[in-house]
Amino acid sequence: MNFSSKLLENAVAEFAKLPGVGQKTALRLVLHLLNQDKQDVERFSTAVTKLRNEIQFCEVCHNISDQKVCEICSSHRRDHGLICVVEDTRDVMAIENTNQFNGVYHVLGGLISPMDGVGPSDLQVESLVERLKQTGDKEVREVVFALSATMEGDTTLFYLHKKLKNFNIPITTIARGIAFGGELEYVDEITLGRSIATRIPYENSLSK
């Protein structure tokens, strides 16, 4: 692709680094910004810069947050005896949109994937174990696995179950109304909400 400006070429190259964005889409986005008022572009730039520089991860659940402890973990209206384990922030948002879950979360930050070089030590597994050790069965009544129905998701589920099974806490998983290979964030809200509401003991899912 030939560019009439080095500034244009550099901007397109940066946009093209975003997931799912090719050079043509990147060029369209850059040209769109050029047609906007300078103030609008400056607000866009400031928002991205502040996001990168000021964003935090909750000390309790590791969800993206503006404070050291996120709004969900600090809310007195949430059921802190119910912990939902998810892959990342996108899954938290997907479950929250169903309005079917009033507990709290634990964000792993990924899934176990030996092919991609991602092991248990790369995820927030030990912090989950420590979280349960601190509260035990005095506060936490149930741990819900809400991971994508993929090979990586099932591998992670199996590993987590082995790590947590000695705690005196029921461990459940969302019902499989989600097709195998389906990413949680792309499941429609009704199906996801139903899967959360009709969760089953994890051991039952192994026998099917």
Image (cartoon, helix red, strand yellow):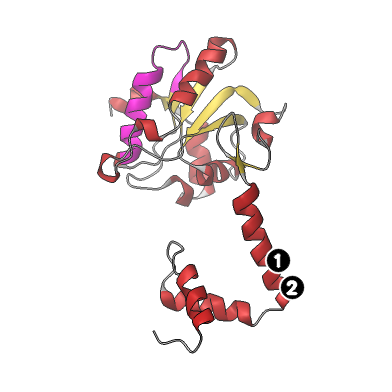
**Which one is nearer the viewer's eye here, 3 or 92?**
3
Q: Is residue 157 magenta?
A: yes
Question: Residue lying farthest front?
Answer: 6
Secondary-structure class at tag 1: helix
Q: Quadrant of the N terminus?
A: bottom left
Q: Nearer the viewer, residue 62 or 6?
A: 6
Q: At numbered mark 2, what does the secondary structure look like: helix, strand or loop?
A: helix
Asked where in the image residue 164 lies, by quadrant, the reply is top left
As drawn, the label of residue 43 is: 1
Q: How many marks?
A: 2
Within 10 angstroms of label 2, few (less than 14), some, or many (20 or more) residues?
Answer: few
Residue type at mark 1: give it.
Arg
In this picture, which residue range is highlighted in magenta? 152-171
Three-letter amino acid code at disc 2? Answer: Gln
- Which residue lies at the image location 43% right of the left edge and 61% below the top edge? 19
> In the image, residue 192 lies at what x, y percent?
49, 42
Please name whichever residue, 2 or 62, is drawn nearer the observer in this view of the structure: 2
Compared with residue 67, is residue 205 higher up or lower down, i.e. above or below?
above
Q: Position of residue 22 (x, y in %)?
A: 41, 72
**Residue position for label 2:** 39
Q: Is residue 142 left or right of residue 48?
A: left
Do residues under tags 1 and 2 come within 8 Å of each other at their CB atoms? yes
The residue sitting at 34% across, 20% down in the picture is 162
Closer to us: 154 or 20: 20
Task: Specify the quadrant that holds the C terminus.
Answer: top left
13 in the magenta segment: no
